[in-house]
Image (spheres, rainbow, N blue to C red):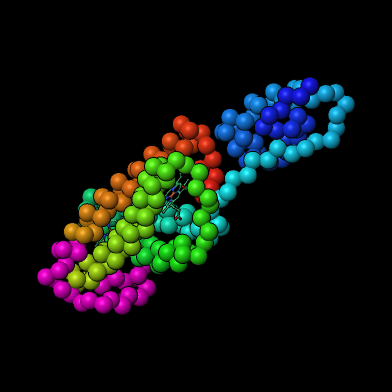
Amino acid sequence: MQAAIKFPEFLFINVYSQMRLHVMERMGLLSELVEQIEVVPQGVTSPSYAQITVERYPGTSRILHWIIAVLVLATWPLGFTIHLVKNDVSMTFYMLHEGIGFLVFWFMLIRVGNKLIARAPSPKDPPMERMAAKSVHGLFYIFLIVMPVSGFLATNAHGFPLQWFGLFEVWSPIDKTPEIAWTLSGVHYWSSWVVLALFLLHMGAVVMHHVIKRDTTLYRIL
Ligand code: HEM
Ligand code: HEM
């Protein structure tokens, strides 16, 4: 019986590759495969492979994505809660917030360099969705540099140079400068809401792709 359109009729599902199976399921292909297995004539043994390959971001991009995501997801709530905790604890919050936030700056510099040389996976969404994704990603790049720079300059301008985890004092291009300190704090404050908005849009896109459209976008970054 000749039933296959997308796949040859003699199919072999690699049971060891859970991820590939899962990807097929998400693409709505698994039911087709199962249907087609049912029509394999008895006695036929030579399998052919049905492979769905997901073009992912290069390893460097994926690693940087998750390191920075973890750092930002720690830094943001720490910054937000500094004022909500008792005075003696708030010094620890400052230290952790500023110390981890400062790391974001250096990893973002590496990430920008990586972006310039690493090959991005080929686009697969309609132009409007691609433009929306590019805008959110681009703004992330900008604001994840603005955030640590404004925070770092603000704390120096207020007269509190960064002691990185109490280990050493980080050199700053500015000393105590009260005239610009609150402007820098304002930039830091408003940028933090932009970052939150970008994060919510980003999560909305993840849910749209993975839960609603059930496509393979999430695997590009895993
Ligand atoms: C990605 C990195 C960063 C994120 C997402 C972030 C986020 C935040 C957030 C949400 C707040 C609370 C809103 C506000 O009061 O302004 C805050 C406050 C603050 N952040 Fe950051 N921050 C980052 C990096 C830094 C760095 C590197 C420093 C300093 C070296 C810093 C210093 C401060 C200071 C001094 C405050 C103000 C607390 C106060 O009002 O006394 N931040 N940050
Ligand atoms: C604060 C945390 C996060 C930030 C700042 C962030 C930022 C980014 C950026 C800038 C990109 C573009 C790729 C690149 O240039 O490296 C990206 C891609 C992606 N991120 Fe995140 N991300 C965060 C958290 C997450 C989380 C928690 C998930 C999943 C649950 C996720 C899922 C994805 C996916 C699926 C892509 C690929 C999108 C595509 O192929 O078009 N991200 N992210």
Residue 7 in sight in this render: yes
Quarter assignment of residue 52: top right
Q: Residue furthest left?
A: 179
User: Residue placed at 60% from the left, 37% from the top?
Assistant: 23
Q: Quadrant of residue 6?
A: top right
- Up the image or down, 53 lies above or below 148; here it is above
Find residue 50 and report its horizontal and vertical position in percent: 70, 37
Instruction: Identify the residue at horizontal 54%, vertical 45% (top origin).
Output: 219
Q: Residue 152: image x %, image y %?
A: 27, 67
Residue at the location (59% across, 45% down)?
54
Query: Image quarter for residue 174?
Result: bottom left
Position of 121 relative to 45 (above/below)? below
| Vertical position of residue 72 compared to residue 22: above or below | below
Q: Residue at x 56, y 50 (%)?
A: 56
Residue 155, given in percent of the width and then of the height, sits at: 23, 67
**Is 8 colored magenta in this rendering?**
no
Q: Outermost residue toward the right?
A: 43
Residue 45 shown left or right of residue 93 in the figure: right
Q: Write the start and end of the magenta stretch as one range.
A: 161-185
Q: In screen coordinates, is 149 left or right of 104?
A: left
